[in-house]
Amino acid sequence: MSKILISFFSASGVTKKVAEKIANSIKGDLFEIEPVEKYTKNDLDWTNKESRSTVEMNNKLFRPAIQDKVSNINEYDTVIIGFPVWWYTAPTIINTFIEENNLEDKNVYIFVTSGGSGSEGSFNDLKNTYSNINFISSKRFRGNESDEDYRNWIK
């Protein structure tokens, strides 16, 4: 039986709720991708060109530091990575996570939470940036899906 890791970054709590629902429905382990420096409401103000998130997203090489590492990444066959969509793609902290963990022999799924953006842009950006990783599929979730919806996606 394959072992599944559900890793997620959640700035406002929405992605965390979805990740917890996925973990419960498919019986996977949870890992929160937490920045060393937490994001404040002002940091997340996408209308402010000087907000932390805007500055980070405008620098594609920026890699926010993560608090903890996955110490047992080799035990997982499948890794699910969840995050809110920022500027039509993954927040740069997701790049930090991917670059700090060897995902080459894993099946990697992406889920996003977004009021408007789908998952395709983020998925394609990550797939193109990390061509050595086996990205399987992506999906946008709103948090109102059933356990069966999550299980069917991973099948």
Image (spheres, grey):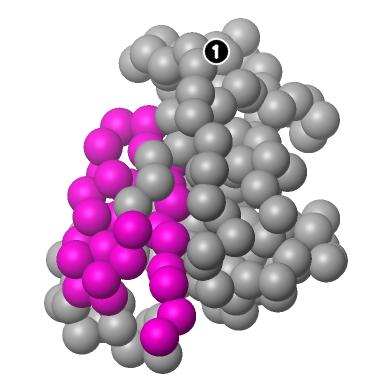
Residue, x 68% and y 60% (percent of image)? 103
Image position, residue 86 (x, y; %): 54, 40
Pointer 1: what residue? 51
Q: Is residue 89 magenta?
A: no
Q: Is residue 2 magenta?
A: yes
Q: Quadrant of the N terminus?
A: bottom left
Above or below: residue 37 compared with residue 31: above
Query: Which residues lie in the magenta part?
Result: 1-29
Residue situated in front as seen by the camera: 12 or 152: 152
Residue, x 43% and y 61% (percent of image)? 5
Instruction: Kindly identify the amino acid type of the residue bearing the numbered disc 1.
Output: Ser
Above or below: residue 59 compared with residue 152: above
Image position, residue 148 (x, y; %): 20, 85
Image position, residue 101 (x, y; %): 66, 48
Residue, x 49% and y 29% (percent of image)? 68
Image position, residue 15 (x, y; %): 32, 47
Residue 130 lies in quadrant: bottom right
Residue situated in front as seen by the camera: 86 or 100: 100
Above or below: residue 149 compared with residue 118: below
